[in-house]
Image (tube, helix red, strand yellow):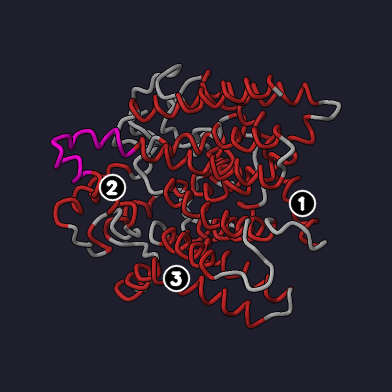
Amino acid sequence: MKRLTTITALLALAAVAIRLHNALHYPADWGFDASFNWRYIYRLSQDWALPPPEAGWSTSDPPLFYYASAAVMRCLAALGARDAVVYLLPLLSALEGLGMVALAVALARRAAPADPLRVALAGLLLLFLPAHLHMSAMVNEEMLVALLTSCAVFGLAVRERGARPGLRPTAAVGLASGLALLTKLSGAIAVATAVLTYAADGWKAGNRARAGLRGAAVLIVALLAGGWFPARSLLTTGSPQPIGLPAHVGMLALPPGERALGDYLRVPLATFRDPQLLNPDLLRSVWGSTFVTVWFDGHRYFLPREGRAVGVLGGVTLLLALLPTAAFAAGLARGAGRLRRGQGAADLPLLLLTALTLAGYAFYTWRNPWFAVVKGTSLLGLSLPFSFYASESLANWLRGRFGPWLMAGLLALAVCVGLSCTFDLVFEKTEVSGLPWPPAEGG
């Protein structure tokens, strides 16, 4: 037990140190849409007026993250320290990520209070998840929407299913999911998960009136909190998530430009041999590209675009990442089995969130067939299900015959993640962030 505590503490400190280093050293205008996000934040900080969707690249997105960031900017400006915002916003993203880690640990402890190994794994799996580390350093709404989604699903996982449960916890779940919707349209998945969870509870208990009441309560609160913005977009542009606006026209030229069913059915060897999304094979593989961007820097926002050492590190990292990925899949199957047997209250919302998120992601990448939108970071809303199920499987496997070898693999994965996700520590990035298109531009 003492050895486990020591190893966990050292790894956790290392993971927090990586986040702190990145927040202070990663260029503020790098990362997914960061430069556009800064423009929107600055604009709001000047007059608070919500611009029309077509006003800029980011102005069609729900505004909670941008308004909160603008408020931080104005507060710092009032203190005469506005320039500090370039450090404070990434630090806040890192803190939001640590909030998800705390929820994951609490949920694992609630499910297995006598299993400290599983509890430790639940936290460490998120602390060393590359997509989690990347977004902790960027000025982007992904960490906030993932935290709010995690708050909602945590509330669902610990809900009371007995007679006459209070509406206050239901309203809290509705508020968290509604704020997620006000941060990014994918927050609608949190709302749907909440409604379906309460509906299923009441249906199973034979109390359809209670199911309708709780489902209606969570939906009303969520829509009041966050439903107004997609409704506004629908009225002004004809879509809750408009595409093809003047600011977005450049994206329409990105490859591959179309999707086929086969893009969702194959994972090419390039996933491990050349883990960057402009590889011709990865362009045609949604899940291969997603795996690369969950566990490595497939878009090259942290690492150099070229270099044999980068490719080797990527291949090794991704091979080792098959272990927690397989553990997640095995845990999902175990959770589905419990759900079929009528056990495990937490499994229903966790499985619903997983299924709806993956289905929504597949639909989104089909509707937007460009390599730039295939990002594992878009799946950070699955942080709690991933942590919950992967830690359950890994804790069991580590106690088995091959436990020492599996532990060595996990520690090696943590080392690889540390090397690839600590900005400018091992690999110096001299070109601008991201993969260029056309590829000839910038090398």
Q: Amino acid at mark 2?
A: Ser
Specify whether 36 is left or right of 109: left
- Mark 1 sits on what residue? 333
* Magenta: main secondary structure: helix
Q: Where 381 falls versus 349 (above or below)?
A: above
**Which of pointers 3 and 1 lies earlier in the amino acid sequence?**
3
Dividing the picture into quadrants, the one containing residue 239 is: bottom left
Pick the residue in front: 358 or 190: 190
Q: Position of residue 370 (x, y in %)?
A: 46, 51
| Quadrant where the image shows the N terminus | top right
Q: Where 13 falls versus 121 (above or below)?
A: above
- Mark 2–mark 3 Cα distance, whole angstroms, equals 24 Å
Residue drawn at 75 percent across, 40 percent down: 393
Q: Position of residue 183 (x, y in %)?
A: 39, 56
Badge 3 local density, few (<14 within 10 Å), some, or many (20+)?
many
Is 332 part of what is drawn in magenta? Answer: no
Is 87 part of what is drawn in magenta? Answer: yes
